[in-house]
Image (cartoon, rainbow, N blue to C red):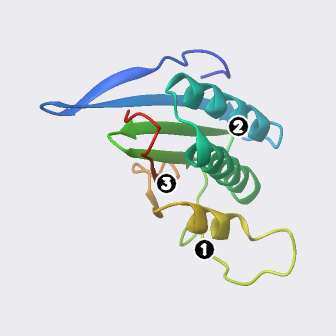
Amino acid sequence: MAPGSALIPRLMDLTPGTEALRYCFALPARPESVAGARQLTRARLESWRLGGDVYDAAVLIVSELVTNAVVHTASTRVVCELRCLGRRLRIAVQDQGHQPGGPRLRRCSDDEHGRGLLLVDTMSSSWGSHDAGDDSGRIVWAELPHGGAERPC
């Protein structure tokens, strides 16, 4: 899927009486795609009327997860999914790489590199990773609660 094509938001029914907003996009696994991922995330969160802290945290998390996929895997594309269910926002980034053991959290890093997952860990209520299946790469995800003045999805 080329950037900017087939970026259609879908409403998906997960269980009877429960609906979730879902938005998915794919970008080439190149450093310049990180800015595109932030831009697409901002636009979608604005259309879903999610603002404040969850907006800022989600944009930063997308940026960090896409950056990790670009820098640490041999992927040709990165797929990002935003899913809003009730008062939770779930961010998932899939790469095509095969990093043994998956991403690792580094609690202490003196340089600018290696702090991305620490930021994700700090800003999200939970996060993790798992194989995408069919030997097609890895999915790293994070969840953010939202509430207050913001409307539920």
Question: Which residue appears farthest toward the front when viewing the image?
Answer: 149
Tell me if label 3 and label 1 are in contact, CB under 8 Å: no
| Residue, disc 2 | 38
- Crowding at dot 3, Cα within 10 Å, few <14 / some 14-19 / many 20+, comes out as many
Q: Residue at x 46, y 37 (%)?
A: 150
Question: Mark 1 or 2 closer to N-term?
Answer: 2
Q: Which three-letter amino acid code belongs to the residue tagged 2? A: Arg
Task: Tell whether 14 sits left or right of 60.
Answer: left
| Residue, disc 3 | 141
Task: Tell whether 26 sits left or right of 86.
Answer: right
Q: Position of residue 63 (x, y in %)?
A: 70, 47
Q: Nearer the viewer, mark 3 or mark 1?
A: 3
Q: Secondary structure at mark 1?
A: loop
How far apart marks 1 and 2 lie (CA) works out to 23 Å
Viewport quadrant of the N terminus = top right
Q: Which three-letter amino acid code belongs to the residue tagged 3? A: Trp
Q: Secondary structure at mark 3?
A: strand
- Crowding at dot 2, Cα within 10 Å, few <14 / some 14-19 / many 20+, comes out as some
| Closer to the camera in the image, 103 or 46 | 46
Tell me if label 1 and label 2 are in contact, CB under 8 Å: no
How far apart marks 3 and 2 lie (CA) works out to 16 Å
How far apart marks 3 and 1 lie (CA) works out to 13 Å
**Can residue 111 be seen?**
yes
Question: Mark 3 or 2 closer to N-term?
Answer: 2
| Residue, disc 1 | 104
The label shown at residue 6 is: none
| Closer to the camera in the image, 144 or 3 | 144
Q: Secondary structure at mark 2?
A: helix
Task: Tell whether 147 sits left or right of 47.
Answer: left
Q: Position of residue 151 (x, y in %)?
A: 41, 33
